Amino acid sequence: QVQLVESGGGLVQPGGSLRLSCAASGRIISFRTMAWYRQPPGKERELVAVIGSGGSVRYADSVKGRFSISGDNAKNTNYLQMNSLKLEDTAVYYCNVVTTWDAYWGQGTQVTVSS
């Protein structure tokens, strides 16, 4: 059973940066996509960034040019580098991995952008 654990969230001022990490406790076989979602207060969960097994990457329009998703297969970890953070980036961020057979979610990490 694979478990995903996010870390790296916290409180940051507008314009600041954070790097979120998502570590998988078990070996992920045949992953299709690794992604980050977020759920702002009182809103629906939304896709932030996704990377496919072939290396293709897609970002939400609201984070293009500011966020970057990457993966380290040797460490079974993927990352979300967030730069130039804005107030509206405040949300709980969730890691998601989809394999051929299943989908996994982390427990979420809070990111708060506030002055």
Image (tube, rainbow, N blue to C red):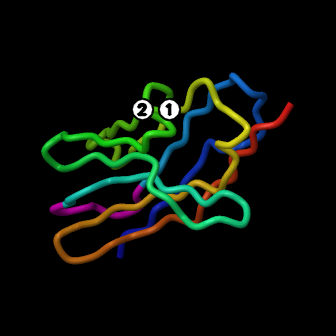
For mark 2, what is the residue?
Answer: 68
Residue 22, above or below 59: below
Residue 18 lies within the magenta run: no
Type of the residue with mark 1? Gln
Type of the residue with mark 2? Ser
Image point (37%, 70%), residue name? 2
Figure quadrant of residue 56: top left
Q: Is disc 2 in contact with disc 1, using a CB cutoff of under 8 Å?
A: yes
Q: Name the quadrant of the N terminus.
A: bottom left
Q: Looking at the picture, how far across and down is residue 108, in whole percent?
A: 60, 61
Q: Looking at the picture, how far across and down is residue 78, in whole percent?
A: 39, 44
For mark 1, what is the residue?
Answer: 81
Residue 80, above or below 42: above
Earlier sequence position, callout 2 versus callout 1:
2
Image point (31%, 39%), residue name? 72
Q: Which residues are magenta?
A: 24-30
Rounded to the nearest angstrom, the CA distance separating label 2 from label 1 is 5 Å
Q: Would residue 16 appear left or right of 27 to someone viewing this image?
A: right
Q: Looking at the picture, how far across and down is residue 102, in whole percent?
A: 27, 76
- Mark 2: few, some, or many residues within 10 Å (few <14, many ≥20)? some
Determine the main secondary structure of the stretch shown in magenta: loop
Q: Name the quadrant of the C terminus.
A: top right
Nearest to the observer: residue 108 or residue 42: 42
Residue 26 lies within the magenta run: yes
Nearest to the observer: residue 97 or residue 58: 58
> Total number of numbered labels?
2
Image point (54%, 64%), residue name? 45
